[in-house]
Amino acid sequence: MAIVVYLETEDGNFKKSALEVSSYGRKLADETKTNLYGIAFNSSDPDKIRKYGIDKLVNIKTDHVFDARIFADLLSKNFKELGGTIFITGSSADSRFIFPVVSILLDASYATNVVDFPSGISPLVLKRSAFTNKGFVFTELKTKYKIIGILNNSYGIFESERKLEVKEYMAESQDSNLQVESIKEDEEKISIADAEIVVSGGRGLKGPENWDLVEDLAKTLGAATACSKPVSDMGWRPHSEHVGQTGKPVASNLYIAIGVSGAIQHLAGINASKCKVVINNDPEAPFFKAADYGVIGDAFEVVPKLIDGLKKFKSR
Amino acid sequence: MKILVCISSVPDTTSKINFIENETQFDKSGVQYIINPNDEFGLTRAMWLKEKQNCEVHVISVGIVDTDPILRKALAIGADQAFRVDINPMDANQVAREISDFIKNKDYKLIIAGRESIDYNGGMVPGMIATLINANYVSNCVSLEVNQSNFKATRETDGGKENISGTLPLVIGGQKGLVEEKDLIIPNMRGIMMSRKKPLTIIEAKYQTFQTDTVKYEKLPPKGAIKLVNPEKINDLIDLLHNEAKVI
Ligand SMILES: Cc1cc2nc3c(=O)[nH]c(=O)nc-3n(C[C@H](O)[C@H](O)[C@H](O)COP(=O)(O)OP(=O)(O)OC[C@H]3O[C@@H](n4cnc5c(N)ncnc54)[C@H](O)[C@@H]3O)c2cc1C
């Protein structure tokens, strides 16, 4: 028996979520008195993970196009090779692409959107966010192999240095009938999924020409930018920024909503954020019931002042 | 070409979420059920393929008789036939297995599911079906073109997009972008009348064992009161975010 974590990399570096996944795995391995193994694709600096509790890392080298089936196959094989019983992954778009496939290949039960350390280990019971953050469900995984998909920022990162052993694994080439071309957004842009801070604009900002307010604030904070659904429906902002029940989920540490009314569908999607700030000129806006901090005022006056203040704060 | 659209019946987005029986059951009372929004974008894309490329569109749902109204709605929107696997599904794996079994030996070239359902947000069903029927698979699918044997699709990733092309059969997890909000079809009277004559076939469920169990539910913790900051003293907000919330 062993716990295995999937450590996601981007351009060869471990993502922040990989550190969280391994911290979670470490605790579970300690509680069950087993080893913690990691699997990564194309890590250029495997030693970086030593601090986060991994006993052994299998670093899979592959230049395959991103075909979910091939990556899932490689993960499943190595998981079995390592004697894994519990597989832990994050919640990025890529891992949510691959792991449903892994779950079939391993005949493993799979819980997504896990927000906490297991509430029971044998049987394994997991607290998951459900109804798009309007509630929680506790799910028991009953099969021999089990997959836990944890939400970003739900557990935290804890250091625990180990004697890391690294095994390089050259992936055999496999047939794929897919051509994949990946188009990255502007390199400097922070993705909503990975962001610790998200700044979001709603219809209250009146038009796309006013979005420099959102962008300047985001830049000052090192935040990702997001928007409400009507804003993306009207083409003021790209769909990729639409957050909420029918858009992207947000689970950041800080969510700042500017000119967003706080409709139930919007709140559902962003509720998992730890701290919510609303800036709105209508004191009756429902967002004021959901936020931790609020400013009743005109965004066009408040936000520039906030940006100024933050710049001074940052240069302190 | 035949297309299968997988439809999940979910609580309306404005529903209050409550639990009963000692927090072990979801309280359905007063809850309106709708076609899962992600599935509806997919269904609409399928209707366009029907119109422009002469495809036949079938819809399927795994669920008990309560699910019939949303299947009728899908028929009113324009699907040709509906199927319902008659069981109250317990987990994604069961849904995927029932649908995959249904698909076997039928010539669906394209299977459209939603990226995730807005009730349990699992996001697993399309990937599981693709694996079980050995088809190609694109999740978070925001654009899709198909011809007789090939597809071109776009997957939204965390930091951008991916253009994927390959051969059919294909399973997608669809979302907004496949069509826009304004493209969604509101059934008209004729559609509703016709839907009553279209076949809705009930299929016996095969899988009665589950990989997971729902132990209990929990409501969100009550929220503390909001702290309002005077817009003339915006530095107070920075102070609170730094010293109290510790998020900047
Ligand atoms: C099935 C379904 C799914 C949905 N999914 C989503 C979803 O995923 N995400 C989502 O966001 N919505 C979703 N919606 C839409 C949702 O119901 C709301 O319509 C939407 O969130 C409102 O967007 P908004 O807050 O930007 O606009 P509005 O509701 O118009 O609010 C604008 C706000 O800006 C404020 N304002 C105006 N001027 C200023 C100013 N100068 N300074 C400060 N504040 C100002 C106003 O007081 C108002 O509160 C969904 C709806 C349905 C039916």
Image (cartoon, coloured by chain):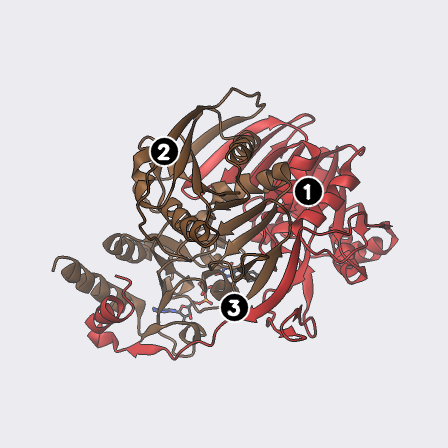
Tags 1 and 2 in contact by the CB under 8 Å rule? Answer: no
Query: Observer-nearest residue: B26 or A43?
Result: A43
Going by the image, does A15 lie left or right of B86? left
Q: Position of residue B6 (x, y in %)?
A: 70, 47
Q: CA distance from mark 1 to mark 2?
A: 50 Å
Query: Is A254 drawn above or below residue A242 in the view shown?
Result: below
Query: Is A141 drawn above or below residue A98 in the view shown?
Result: below
Say which residue label 1 marks.
Answer: B46
- Label 3 residue near ligand 1, CB within 8 Å: yes
Mark 1, residues whose alpha carbon is within 10 Å: few (<14), some, or many (≥20)? many
Residue at 20% of width from left, 62% of height from top? A310
Say which residue label 3 marks.
Answer: A264
User: In the picture, which chain is red?
Assistant: B
Query: Observer-nearest residue: A205 or A189?
Result: A189
- Amino acid type for the residue under numbered disc 3: Ile
Quarter of the figure with residue A164: top left
Indicate the quadrant containing the C terminus of chain B: top left, top right, bottom left or bottom right.
Answer: bottom left
Secondary structure beneath disc 1? helix
Task: Please give the label number shown on residue B223.
Answer: none
View extreme (front): residue: A33
Q: Earlier in the sequence, mark 2 or mark 3?
A: 2
